[in-house]
Image (spheres, helix red, strand yellow):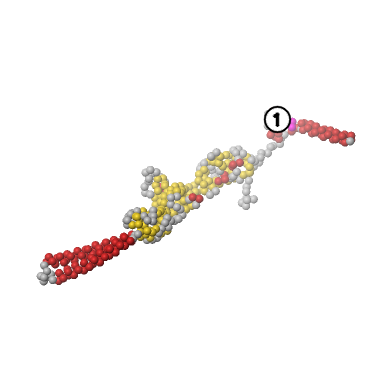
């Protein structure tokens, strides 16, 4: 037991002697002495290696790929706003008064053809008037036949002296009167037939019903609106354009409309308003768009290509946004180790097309820019340029 205690004590003393020896060596080492000297002189300890004649290695903050601004020919686009309207709306109304709506044959959204019945009016009284007028025509035909017969006899015996000239004139005048009465009755008969046809309200053109005011049992008046009809189902977009930009537009140009959900519809300019609104100072552009591609009443944005314009563009990933401003990182010349510093430059961006964004002035085509990773860089950072092969290796 005593031997074990001596062994442990001896081991402890040996370890302590080793620690003291290592400490003494460290404090006497030239590198540590140089570090202490630099601290006393006020120099940072990071220069220790240089104090001993060993150059320090600068580490890159990021490995980056590079890109160059590209000269591009981009289309000039005019952006307009406006609403979608029916091409033309036809008002469907009754042409006869005092009749009750007996049957409704169409509703909102119904596709109808020209002449298709939409509303049936109660026609009992009109049919009764028609029968009455038919009887009147028959009576007048009989009266004309009698008057004609008397006039013919009067003309035959005119020169015989059997009848006085006054009586002969009466027969001739009676014939003319009977003929006129028959013509009047026949005209009234045609009027009753027209009234009977008017008890059937029909579509004035092909199209789709956009609104309905007719209700079963209503007594209509002539001119009362019963339906609205989008003629031929055609719709159009009416965009507002500034009077100064109006000269850039012409009939036949293509217009891209952006609908809800990002869907696009292509239309063609049909005509441009010859006048400018006194209040808005804008003119209307009428654009035909495909049937059923949108709903009337929608407010959408349209774009019209009006030519080509040269510009400078870079990939979207080369632009970094900070505090509401856009920046790119330009690469300075490489140092001895092949590393390069970045220079943060504020830029003004323009249009975006695909994966490219336009830069408005300030950069030349030969400028070398960081392709991506700008969010992790600051002005003056050192980076290493790497090249990625086409196959991504």
Label 1 packing within 10 angstroms: few (<14), some (14-19), many (20+): some
* Position in image of residue 123 (x %, y %): 33, 60
* Position in image of residue 114 (x %, y %): 38, 60
Q: As displayed, is residue 248 above or below residue 332?
A: below
For image coordinates 58% across by 45% down, the residue present is: 371
Quadrant of the rendered image containing residue 88:
bottom left
Q: Residue furthest top?
A: 40
For image coordinates 35% across by 59% down, the residue present is: 122
* Position in image of residue 2 (x %, y %): 89, 34
Q: As displayed, is residue 250 above or below residue 322?
A: below
Image quadrant where one finds the N terminus: top right
Q: Tell me if residue 267 is in the magenta stretch.
A: no
Q: Nearer the viewer, residue 354 or 73?
A: 354
Is 41 on the left or on the right of 172, as rendered? right
For image coordinates 59% across by 42% down, the residue present is: 374
For image coordinates 62% across by 52% down, the residue present is: 391
Q: As displayed, is residue 174 above or below residue 376?
A: below
């Amino acid at each position: 037991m005593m031997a074990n205690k001596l062994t442990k004590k001896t081991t402890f003393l040996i370890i302590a002697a080793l620690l003291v020896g290592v400490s003494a060596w460290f404090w006497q080492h030239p590198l540590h002495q140089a570090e202490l000297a630099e601290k006393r002189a006020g120099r940072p300890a990071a220069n220790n290696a240089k104090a001993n004649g060993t150059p320090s290695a600068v580490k890159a903050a990021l490995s980056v790929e590079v890109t160059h601004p590209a000269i591009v020919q981009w289309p000039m686009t005019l952006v307009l706003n406006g609403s979608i309207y029916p091409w033309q709306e036809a008002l469907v109304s009754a042409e006869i008064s005092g009749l009750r709506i007996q049957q409704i044959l169409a509703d909102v959204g119904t596709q109808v053809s020209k002449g298709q019945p939409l509303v049936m009016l109660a026609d009992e009284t009109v049919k009764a008037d028609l029968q009455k007028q038919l009887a009147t025509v028959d009576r007048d035909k009989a009266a004309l036949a009698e008057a004609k017969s008397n006039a013919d006899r009067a003309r035959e015996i005119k020169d015989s002296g059997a009848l006085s000239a006054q009586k002969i004139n009466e027969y001739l005048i009676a014939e003319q009167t009977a003929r006129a009465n028959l013509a009047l009755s026949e005209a009234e008969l045609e009027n009753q037939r027209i009234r009977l046809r008017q008890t059937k309200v029909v579509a004035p053109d092909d199209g789709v019903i956009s609104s309905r005011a007719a209700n079963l049992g209503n007594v209509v008046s002539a001119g009362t609106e019963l339906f609205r009809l989008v003629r031929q189902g055609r719709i159009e977009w009416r965009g507002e354009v500034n009077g100064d930009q109006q000269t850039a537009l012409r009939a036949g140009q293509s217009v891209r409309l952006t609908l809800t959900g990002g869907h696009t519809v292509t239309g063609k300019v049909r005509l441009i308003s010859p006048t400018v609104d006194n209040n808005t100072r804008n003119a209307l552009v009428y654009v035909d768009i495909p049937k059923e591609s949108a709903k009337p009443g929608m407010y959408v944005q349209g774009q019209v290509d009006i030519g080509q314009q040269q510009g400078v563009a870079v990939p979207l990933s080369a632009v970094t946004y900070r505090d509401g401003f856009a920046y790119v990182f330009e690469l300075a010349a490489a140092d001895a180790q092949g590393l390069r510093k970045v220079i943060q430059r504020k830029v003004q961006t323009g249009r975006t097309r695909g994966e490219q964004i336009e830069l408005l002035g300030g950069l030349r085509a030969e400028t070398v820019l960081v392709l991506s990773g700008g969010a992790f860089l600051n002005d003056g950072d050192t980076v290493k340029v790497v090249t990625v092969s086409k196959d991504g290796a």
